[in-house]
Image (cartoon, coloured by chain):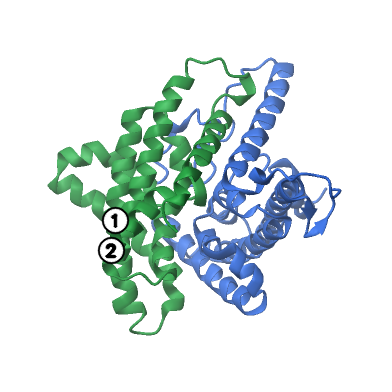
Amino acid sequence: MNLFLIAIGAALVNNVVLSQFLGLCPFIGVSKKVDTAAGMGGAVIFVITIASAVTSLIYTFILDKLDITYLQTIVFILVIAALVQFVEMFLKKKMPPLYSALGVYLPLITTNCAVLGIALINVQKSYGFLTSVINGFGTAVGFTIEIVIMAGIRERIEYNDIPESFKGTPIVLVTAGLMAMAFFGFSGLIK
Amino acid sequence: MNRTTERLYNGIVKENPTFVQMLGMCPTMAVTTSAVNGLGMGLTTTVILILSNMMISALRKVIPDKVRIPAYIVIVASFVTIIQFLLEGFVPSLYDSLGIYIPLIVVNCIILGRAESYASKNNVWLSMFDGIGMGLGFTIGLTSIGIFRELFGNGTVFNVRIMPEQYEPVTILILAPGAFFVLACLIAAQNKIRMQRAEKKGENSLVCERKDGCIGCTNTLCGGREFEGTQGKEVSK
């Protein structure tokens, strides 16, 4: 039950994009069409869940054991970068259909601050292995929900008459602001 | 104008990271809830930017081209860790309020962008001034957005009450949605200026200027227009 609350909290209440501003770049860049947005969301769920698991293991069994937790930022960013490359190679070799679906989005995730952010949050809140994975998964699902909603709205916005200077990023940000207000409604869910 | 002052001018005015290049938007939105946080984040980033620019510039002939991005990331991450400890030790209040955004400076576009586009090609002295200029430009950007949000969202600036007592603060400005609205207006204003300039020159206003820029965020905030196609290849090393 507790894990369920953490997942809901990560996905809806402490939403990555709308309340913590992590992963804004893909959120704005890849939200033009619903299917590409869903592809990006899938890739993010995949990578963040694996990255949370791996960084949690590394933290508990290497950094904490050797008492070198101060190296966490350096280790995490390198592990994440290597992991993304590795996942990409693995998918290309073993699961070509999944690779062709996620392929283009995977390299974009390396510098996505959400992945590093979640790894650091897991450590900061001293979550265990299972909790970290659930938290990472929940966060990524939250990201996917948002980017898909945003893509749906953007497809509609295309047909509307927007002031010339608000076209492109500004209108996306205004929409994101309104979505953030709507997501405030979830904050009562968990105390 | 000699080259060092040219660097400073370039960073603070001509290619200001916040107002002109629109880089590093994640920290810009997250920490500008008050002027103090904006200033603190700006100065922290400045110090890291100067140090990493100097180090990368000094090592530019040693680092092999193929592994340069991981090498830059390690250098930046080391400095971020050092600065994080200094902040924790000497300015704990700032450390607490910036929280997770301090380690996230590692993935800030500005730092890797400057390493890639300037420090890896120029000498240590000029790279240092490039870092100072860009850092100060970023600091000015963050502080002014912070002042704006704090003034209208809370009625204070640097925790000093400015607005009269009767002023009803627009609290939404210091909450998460406010960050999106403020940034949206900022980019819209920038687009407006750009379009007017382009009209004077008789050019197509929709052409996006920034094609190189940083690794992860190439063009994403550039009106969101040229994202597909220009992305991937830079990142895949």
Q: Which chain carries label 2?
A: A
Q: How many marks?
A: 2
**Residue A29 in the image, given as x and y percentages of width and height:** 45, 36
**Residue A28 in the image, given as x and y percentages of width and height:** 48, 36
Q: Mark 1 lies on which chain?
A: A
Looking at the image, is B121 positioned above or below residue A104? below
Asked whether residue B216 is in view, the answer is no
Q: Name the residue under label 1.
A: A49
Decide which of B118, A110 is in the foreground and name it: A110
Residue type at numbered disc 1: Thr
Q: Name the residue under label 2.
A: A53
- Residue B174 bears which disc, if any? none
Q: Residue furthest bottom?
A: A66
Decide which of A28, B156 is in the foreground and name it: B156
Decide which of B111, A162 is in the foreground and name it: A162
Task: From the rendered image, report the letter of the chain displayed in blue.
Answer: B
Looking at the image, is B135 positioned above or below residue A41? below
Q: Which residue is pictured at 73% across the width and 55% down the height?
A: B35
Rendered image quadrant of residue B223: top right
Q: Which residue is pictured at 49% across the width and 56% down the height?
A: B107
User: Gap in Å between the C-alphas at discs 2 and 1?
Assistant: 6 Å
Task: From the rendered image, report the letter of the chain displayed in green.
Answer: A
